[in-house]
Image: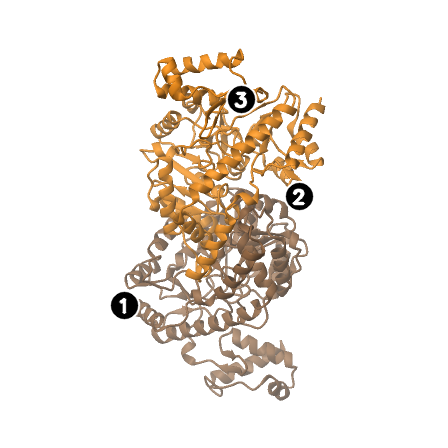
Chain colours: A brown, B orange
Amino acid sequence: LLYEQVAGEIESQIQNQTLSPGDRLPSVRQMSRAQKVSISTVVQAYIHLEQKGLVEARPQSGFYVKPQGFQLPEPDTKKPHFKSTSVSIGDVISSIFGAAREKDIIHLGAACLSPELYPSKKLNRLTSQVLKETPLHSAQYDMPPGYLPFRKQLAKRMLHSGAKVRAEDIVTTAGAMEAITLALKVCTRPGDTVMIESPIYYGTLQVLQSLGLKAFEVPCHPRTGVDPDEVRALLKKEKVKAGLFIPNFNNPVGSLMPDENKKSLVQIFSEKEIPLIEDDIYGDLTFSSQRPSTLKRYDNDDWVITCSSFSKTLAPGYRVGWVISKRFQEQLEREKFISTVATASLPQYILNQYLADGGYDRHIRHLKDVFSQQIHRVSDTICQNFPKETKFTRPLGGFVLWVELPKHIDSVKFHDQALQKGVSVTPGVVFSARGSYKNFIRLNCGNLWSPEIERALKKLAQMAHGME
Amino acid sequence: LLYEQVAGEIESQIQNQTLSPGDRLPSVRQMSRAQKVSISTVVQAYIHLEQKGLVEARPQSGFYVKPQGFQLPEPDTKKPHFKSTSVSIGDVISSIFGAAREKDIIHLGAACLSPELYPSKKLNRLTSQVLKETPLHSAQYDMPPGYLPFRKQLAKRMLHSGAKVRAEDIVTTAGAMEAITLALKVCTRPGDTVMIESPIYYGTLQVLQSLGLKAFEVPCHPRTGVDPDEVRALLKKEKVKAGLFIPNFNNPVGSLMPDENKKSLVQIFSEKEIPLIEDDIYGDLTFSSQRPSTLKRYDNDDWVITCSSFSKTLAPGYRVGWVISKRFQEQLEREKFISTVATASLPQYILNQYLADGGYDRHIRHLKDVFSQQIHRVSDTICQNFPKETKFTRPLGGFVLWVELPKHIDSVKFHDQALQKGVSVTPGVVFSARGSYKNFIRLNCGNLWSPEIERALKKLAQMAHGME
């Protein structure tokens, strides 16, 4: 492809050091004239280089060659296993997280943001407004499917991901994990197999375990997520009752499935008439200017069930999420009633007002700037301090890094030692039903950068050097 | 027994009309002197007559013979079945409740209160206070087991039911149904059998169905709940993994297990080391001056798991409940995380403040007065208008009536017809895993009495007369 040629030329200039770290690339217009290609080709080329981690975009300024120190490699994608496995990770997880909840710890474990990053002031102002306008909000159950004006706002926001959905097909939930549980409940029974990507958020694995479901893992590429061809091949190996993927900024690897792959994935599942659940909780947190597509966008045959929440963007303490499906709407509504009867009314009213007032997009832009900066800082600190066998991801959104430590390091022991030194990390084993990723850790970059965090990272680096 | 003799004498005076409806019984002291029995014997006799529905206590005034019109009998207790049954009532229920959610209907179906009966004003005032004092409340997950000061308040309130529990043994939840689900999850697996009372709240049956559990029903006496001897006998018939009862004001029959029976029930389950789940959501809503005991009170060996919420007393829209168990605390905490990650923080902060400020007891006293009045009014209307084969309960707390219509009436058809006339009722079949109670309906008395409600009840009466 033309853009790849353009990108390849620049890449070789970086490699032979014609272009040095910190150098600014020619502007898109200049490049277009010089290479006699269209502007959009140059843009594609630059984005491609950015995604490869060779250059970085600086807002209002252009693209710059990244510092060399940044060049520790990315983790490799695992080879697939060809069958499902039962899930039993509950005990590991609770022993890990029990210890990590103490207050005096630098939290690089759980995927949480600094509280200051949420728009609490505005939400509190809106709360006072809601108290005045609907003083009886707490005196009634807001029965499933949930508060209609809020669901209309959610339907509107889905347009940003290219998906047209009706408010009637949305059921509000107590956060995204309830949404995912409901989605799994309507399409599986205990003993069934669910195809998931690997690594995947441990909460998802706990839900599978709790519902008595087996996991059929597909390796997730750290940039592009699962490979549809591999998915297609693996689906032939075993009867699968549902798929469950995080197409936008998989937690923990930060991958983003290209649109073509999303489209293929939806096609594959639709052809086989298998429900395809997407967890889109990080979708809004892209580092690029374009909000990525949901699988729902390509869901012509209504097999995709979209789950999400505002816990990573607006208010984790509100516990508000949602699940979207036309085909399964009635069953989802029923399972929601059985699960927790209704979603709390006040937070739905507040969030509805927040979305209606505008300002969400501005808030998200701010978050993204903070996250991409923090990820760069943590990445730099890793490159400068960790053993040189270390590998780590270049996430394209979200706020976590997935770090592969030298092979001999057992990350559960690493976690235990780190905790004794006052730092929490999440060991890789909890992100797989098979106990893979023994030498991986996930680092949370959602906390505002501080000298404490830098010191914490250097402690981790020291530990990694010391563990032989 | 002596008190039965005293009661029997009065009863015959009522029957031969020496004592007429509206007459005041002699004071306890007078009666004690006249009959030469102890004061406590007279008190027992009067309470016995009250429970039989022959006399009624009027606060600050004494006991009065009840109006004759009130004398439609109570429903009989069913004979037990000797084995468990699988549960599949989901479809019936959702078809029923879908229709009943419309706005212009007189809601005698769902067990809901008039919104004005909740202390919204005070809760809203406390909300403003919380927003000021903890402006970042929404910006953090309040991780399980939940907000400690709130759990301390809950532990304190448990003392009113005679139970000493530690705040550390309480996990807060998104309402009582989540609490019950978590409790069942920690002691059962799909396919297991749970002993429940019959009739029982349909939400409980839906949860059993959703978890793939079988129900082993024990008949519930309309005044005294399940009979411990019967429980003991039935436990010999089949392997049971948990018991689940509503000892205080069973929904729908309003029964209250006597303390001796509660004690025996706990003993029976403790001896067999079977977890015993109690749903205490109506426990505070007693019509007597004494808050009834929880099973937890008698739980010396730590087999009781207590579940409850404030949805029937303070704020259904908040979705806050809790589950109490020392033995299963860790597992409950873990299952809570898997279910909905965390309980919303704001409502826990508000409710904590509400309990700390006092005034809950006063609020409850007010609710009880309203409910007992409304139940009397609905009861009178039934007696004056329904077919004379009708039977109904004399609940000792809560706000629902359980009505046995003439045998030939199919209550699902009755429900459908009522809905067409703008009135919702809950048909009896949804309160049993076996589809029993075909000619029963549950009437909600939680709405403030109004001419509309009276008209609605008369419509129901007319329909009952008309259905041949």
Q: Which mark is residue A466?
A: 1
Question: Mark 2 belongs to which subunit?
Answer: B
In the displayed structure, would residue A156 be above or below residue B120?
A: below
Q: Which residue is mark 3?
A: B22
Q: Earlier in the sequence, mark 2 or mark 3?
A: 3
Report the mark closest to the observer, 1 or 2.
Answer: 2
Amino acid carrying label 3: it is Gly
Residue B195, position as x, y percentages in the image: 46, 29
User: Residue A389 sits in which quadrant?
Assistant: bottom left
Say the numbered circle drawn on residue A150.
none
**What secondary structure is found at the residue carrying circle 1?**
helix
Quarter that holds the N terminus of chain B: top left
How many marks the image carries: the answer is 3
Pick the residue in front: B160 or B346. Answer: B160
Percent coordinates x, y for residue B149 in the rendering? 37, 51
**Front position among marks 3 and 1:** 3
In the picture of the structure, the residue carrying the numbered disc 2 is: B102
Q: Is residue B421 left or right of residue A92?
A: right
* Mark-to-mark CA distance, 2 and 3: 41 Å
Secondary structure at numbered mark 3: loop
